[in-house]
Image (cartoon, rainbow, N blue to C red):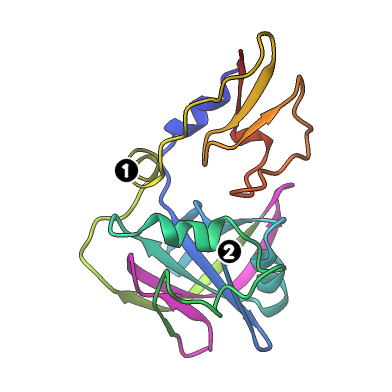
Amino acid sequence: MNPKAMYKLSYGLFVCTAVVGDKKNGCIINTAIQVASDPNRISIAVNKANYTHDMIKESHRCNISVISQKATFDMFKHFGFQSGRDVDKFADTSAFTYNTSEDGVPYITSGTNAAFALKVEQEVDLGSHTLFICEPLAMRLLDDAPSCTYEYYQNNIKPKPQAVGTTPKGETVWRCTVCGYEYVGEELPDDFVCPICKHGKDDFEKIVR
């Protein structure tokens, strides 16, 4: 099987935000869809490794902000390449602007075109992710710019990987397809995380020099 076939599936991109106590946090997700119209329901899938996931499970509330084609790579780095367990993502807002919905959860207003305040009704364990089935409590239009798909992000927003460095003949290089970081070694550990962009093994390609 060729795992790159997964890249051909059509995805939007979203900033998913949550609040527990005084802590605000957010992460990038690529799965948010309307699954029913009467009553209106939206499902989101969030990786269990994300701190935002745990906050949603505790609070049963979240916002999703639909990323538009006006978004900058800095916003993706801010919400996607660092963990809320290590940093306060809302302490430095130089990469984005936000407002707060009636339930106290922030939603992103820069580089987005719509926002939804969601209340979790059901949870489904999907292994690496939890699927949250949610009731929309508020829906806002923010901009007329087209939504950013995963393909648009790959082709127009994400910087192109840097050229592979010169290594001794026969050496194996694992290159991160997101940021271009290179790991030299015959095998890449299954639990390896890119030290630059925090993406896992699935986002590395093997190159032999």
Q: Tell me the quarter of the picture where residue 167 sits.
A: top right
**Closer mark to the observer between disc 1 and disc 2:** 1
Is residue 51 rendered to the left or right of residue 80? right
Q: Is residue 188 above or below residue 134?
A: above
Quadrant occupied by the C terminus: top right
Instruction: Indicate the position of residue 28 as horizontal and vertical percent values.
Output: 52, 58
Query: As displayed, is residue 64 above or below residue 200?
Result: below
Q: Identify which amino acid the numbered label 2 is placed on.
A: Ile
The 10 Å Cα crowd at callout 2, few under 14, some 14 to 19, many 20 or more, is: many
Which label is found at residue 133? 2
Main SS type for the magenta part?
strand
Quadrant housing the N terminus: top right
Q: Quick one: 198 or 99, which is closer to the camera?
A: 198
User: Residue at horizontal 68%, vertical 35%?
Assistant: 201
Give, as a three-letter code, the residue at label 1: Asn
Q: Is residue 200 left or right of residue 26?
A: right
